[in-house]
Amino acid sequence: MKKLLLIIALPILLGAFALHGQDPNDPAPDPNDPMDTTDPNAPDYQEGEGGNRTPVVENVTAAQIEGTKLMEIFYDLKVSDNRDCVVTVKWSTDNGNSFPLTATALVGAAGPGVVPGDGLKVTWDMGVDWNNQFTQSGRIKIIASRIPADYNPAGSTPTGGTSETGI
């Protein structure tokens, strides 16, 4: 699945940030992935105006709300066909060498069903995911992936079955 990401350096608990850019270690496009719209042989590719429909995340800013453990993250999300996306926020404490933490305490434009647009806002409660810790080497990575046209959040399949399992 082709994903676009931006990494932001954040000296956490100080509120400053610096844009780092796209992760150079992101894997190469997968020609067998139907979501990879950069490959002309992929099922979801469109020539011309539709072209590459890979999500583009731009204009990312982030700052800690003074006196709180909340981080406000703003960004623009563009997808040429305006299909909803899944937006994930990852966290690194080692200057971007790894991103072991996925932020879960998020409110706003994160998770499945994010509609592309400008000035999208996510508020991350770092006190839930990363409480009483400090780093000068923090980085945030925002990952946006298109939701497939046949995606069904209830787990139903086109044949009427479900993908849910349980006891």
Image (tube, rainbow, N blue to C red):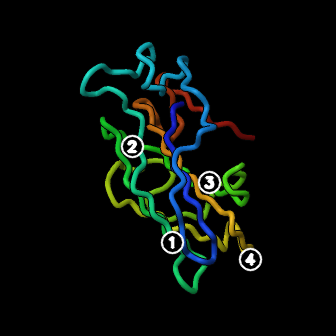
3 and 4 marks in contact (CB < 8 Å): no
- Where's residue 44, x and y in %? 40, 22
Disc 2: which residue:
84
Q: Residue at position x 42%, y 48% from top?
A: 57
Q: Earlier in the sequence, mark 3 or mark 4?
A: 3
Q: Earlier in the sequence, mark 4 or mark 1?
A: 1
Please name the amino acid that badge 3 sits on. Lys
Left or right: residue 149 compared with residue 100:
left
Among all residues in the image, which is located at the extreme left? Answer: 49
Disc 3: which residue:
90
Tag 1, which secondary structure? strand
Q: Mark 3 or 1, which is nearer the eye?
A: 1
Residue 63: which disc? 1
* Alpha-carbon span between mark 2 and mark 3: 19 Å
Residue 132: which disc? 4
- Where's residue 78, x and y in %? 35, 45
